Image (cartoon, grey):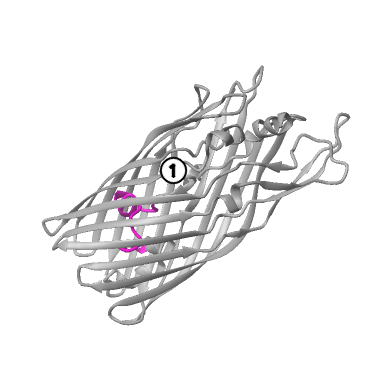
Amino acid sequence: MHINNKLKTAIAATVLAAAAPYAAATNGDHMLGLSAIQNGMAGAIVAAPQDATTVLVNPAGMAELGIKEVRFDLGVGFFNPPRRVNGMDSDSNLYMMPAGAVAFRVNDQLTLGMGLGGLSGMGVDFADTMVAPGNQSLVTTKQFFKVAPGFAYRVNDSVSIGATVNLNYQSLALSGFSPAGRFDLPQNQVFGWGVTAGLIWKLNPALQLGAAWSSKQRMGDFEWNTPTTPASTGGKISMRMDAPQTLALGLAWRPAPGLLIAGDIKQIWFSDVLGTVAVSRPVGYTGAVPAAFPFGWSNQTIYALGIQKDIGDKMQIRAGFNYGKSPIGPEDVNANLGSLAVVEKHLSLGISRKFSDKVTGSLSYVHAFSNSVTSNIAPLNTIELKQNLVNMQVSYQF
């Protein structure tokens, strides 16, 4: 047991987070939304699609955008996630994250689209976390980016379906320590793929159901060549880090003209990909990279509620709340000193303004309230995180 605890402490360096340039207010390491409109609704978007970035969440929603020919949505976010381990602050606390999508109406039934943006990730840069005597720096960077071409098909006036093929890019850098010593695995990248499918079902003019499922995103193996030194035998190290399967169900209610209330429940199967990540090492390897990274992430159930109100015929305001219990528990803190994906409660605000019949601008702010988790296994490390996210978006529809 003592050796296992040391190993968990060692593994701090390989934890994730939403891609330095593609991070956002997060459930675990998954973003709430990809646009100002989606984030303004706190991620309650499965049953109430409003922009072309629905192709990345629920592709069936493209059929419900009410476009004549085309809709473009381009946006950029500025993300501030102050992170702490044992009272020590991580450097690099401001990131920029772009996202965009387009939907083309082919005919009354078929809409084609494509979106691109960050799916998940995170990163830290600690000079010293004080988990061991002396300077024990931790540096991690993970980026997960996807391009998703797909379609939506209106089966009838009540039902629309859709699907995408996800073409994924992932990069990872790990730098930390293990009981065998210091290890540094430089930035590396792999490609992979997965699929997403969605459904929109109008029960009546005021009530609409939505569902979206995304498969496990199968990624290639990261590979690093580690050197042989007088103190250790090196060789090729490899590991695979897939992205988890997700399922979301949503309900959108329009109780009065100009008023939308939307709620989502989402499940993310983190344990399947971030429970224990095995590392392939050469026979006779005696270096510092461990045989496995026991992150111990639990599956996460997320609840999101968003409200939108029209103010006249040119403005909309939004507010929302999102909650998901941290996938990292006290028993797994020491294995996640480089991850810190522990925020649980998010509050969002948003606004949209029509500049013309074709052009709309949107702005949103999301605050993830500070949350900390302390290890119940020695050493009693504490990880803490809060987040602020501002998104701006420009939409063109014709």
Front residue of this view, candidates 354 and 135: 135
Give the position of the C terminus as an image quadrant. Answer: bottom left
Front residue of this view, candidates 74 and 260: 260
Location of residue 180 in the rendering, given as x and y in whole percent from the top left corner: 77, 30
Where is 349 relative to 309, above or below? above
Q: Residue at x 53, y 59 (%)?
A: 245
| Most common secondary structure along the magenta stretch | loop
* Left or right of residue 249: residue 230: right
Callout 1: few (<14), some (14-19), or many (20+) C-alpha neighbours within 10 Å? Answer: some
Front residue of this view, candidates 371 and 298: 298
Residue behind mark 1: 325
Where is 81 relative to 312, above or below? above
Location of residue 18 in the rendering, given as x and y in whole percent from the top left corner: 50, 45
* Left or right of residue 11: residue 314: left
Query: Which quadrant of the structure image shows residue 369?
Result: top left
Where is 229 relative to 58, above or below? above
Region of the chain picked out in magenta, as a range: 33-52
